[in-house]
Image (tube, helix red, strand yellow):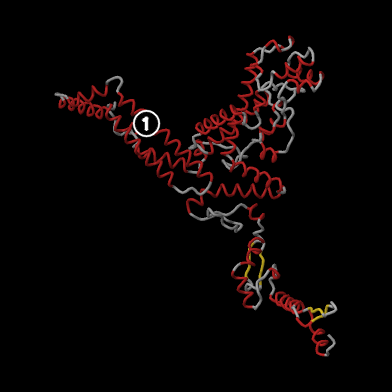
Amino acid sequence: METILEDQRRLHEERERLIDLQTKELLRKKATTREQINSDHLVKLLWDKYIESTSNLIGLYEDKDGLRKKEIQLLSGPNEHSEFNTRLKAIITYHKKTNLSDTTNITVPMSVEYDNLIKSIQSNDDDAGALVSFTDEEGYGKYLDLNELYQKYVNLKGVERINYIAYLSTYDHLFKIPREKKNQDYFKYLQSLFNYLNDYLARVKPLLDTESEINQAVNDFERKWSEGTFPGWPKETTGALTKSGAYLDLSSYSSWEELASLGLDRLKSALMALGLKCGGSLQERAIRLFQTKGKRLQDLDPSLFAKAQQTSKKSIKEYTDKHREIAELEAKVYRLSEILSVQRNGTIENVQRKQALTPGEREQEEEAEIVADESEEEDEDDGVIYNPKNLPLGWDGKPIPYWLYKLHGLNLYYNCEICGNHKYRGPKAFQRHFSEWRHAHGMRCLGIPNTAHFANITLIEDAVQLWDKLKVNRETERFVPENQEEYEDSHGNVLNKKTHDDLKRQGLL
């Protein structure tokens, strides 16, 4: 059994090793999204171990049971030599009784233990994914899988039925849903949406303090709710006009006399919408309705309510609290959606791309993904990139996806004779080369200006013919003073320069 001081030394060593491992892992270059997510989960695991070791170390230093103090006294007291001999004798006795050939009792050194841990996490084996798991639709943290939530959304009563791509773009536009549609079913859907986003964020960004982000969102919500500026829940919805019906907006009325001008029937309809008594004269109805301006239902006198619809303050408070709970959950969804904006945009692009593919192209892409997954481990071991289709390399040094290769037309080559029969890969590079140095140098060698007139012209003969035609047009359009410069005689007749000079020489002007 280890002593308390030895336990402290071991915990200090463990904390130092954990800090060193976290630093090395954070500095290690991660080329793919999969490597980044696995690395973040590894750092999170090491950090949790560090917190656990620190907590245990604090408990030993606090020494609530007094065993550490007692051990120090034994080692530093007057009988320290006898204590040392006693412990040494116990160690010798233990090793004599222990069979040294039995390797099961050999403790793995701490350095070897953590090295094996990191190797197992960084490997591409199936066991390495034990720290985190994703569905096939999520693409190991690159996309969102909201298909189940989409089905729940379209089954809500009163909401607009939209397609999946539109839902991905607007699933956090909760403020556009009418308040009267936000019932218990909507609350359950909202809870499911929040739970998924929260779980997905914990898997994609394990190092992010999600709890702190949610607390910040709640604090912002409470401030906006008190001010009545929270999206989808204006201040009027917390007042006396919360019930559905033919209610009347009193913000533009400054006295009950103005309300009286609306007539008995309109005042009755407004009072019935609020559940208030609707009888009495025109003046009584107007005064009763004007008393609700700027007030909440729970602040009104209970005697104003109709007997059949007497509403207690407790039920009104429960009604308002339910709305507040829904709005607070919406604020959390807003914040999580903002954090996951990158994955959301990637999901929209991925769904649009898949819908545009033909069945044959989808099969090709799936086969390419399977081959890439199988060859990923081999590529990392021998450094040889598996690229049977000779695809261009991306920014990470690996072949770009086949669908992206076809989308950008990189399988097409364009030849330009003016550039010295240089070939350009893809239409984008071909269009860009007309403004680059190679094409401009070829045009200068031909004595032709590289203007917009020669866009998309790649043959020397075509460029020369067009330049000759442009020169002829310019010559005909050139300004000739003898024919185009105008003069006026004493009678107001307009003449060109040549005619004017001839008449002047003849003395006819």
Q: Residue at x 45, y 40 (%)?
A: 120
Residue on which the image places disc 1: 53
Q: What percent of the width, then of the height, locates residue 438?
A: 60, 70
Residue in the picture at 71% in, 49% down: 360
In the image, 72 versus 268, the foreground residue is 268
| SS state under label 1 | helix
Residue positioned most to the bottom:
506
Q: Is residue 104 left or right of residue 33?
A: left
Question: Closest to the observer: 187 or 478?
Answer: 478
Left or right position of 82 against 269:
left
Q: Position of residue 269 (x, y in %)?
A: 79, 19
Q: Is residue 267 above or below residue 443?
A: above
Pick the quarter of the image with the N terminus: top left
Q: Quadrant of residue 159?
A: top right
- Image quarter in which the C terminus is found: bottom right
Q: Amino acid at mark 1?
A: Ser
Tell me the residue at 61%/57% (across/down). 389
Q: Nearer the viewer, residue 318 or 45?
A: 318
- Residue 80 image position (x, y, % from top left): 16, 26
Residue furthest front in the image:
490
Count of residue discs: 1
Q: Residue at x 69, y 30 (%)?
A: 152
Asked which quadrant contains residue 415, the reply is bottom right
Crowding around mark 1 (Cα neighbors within 10 Å: few <14, some 14 to 19, many 20+) is many
**Percent position of residue 129, x then y:** 51, 38
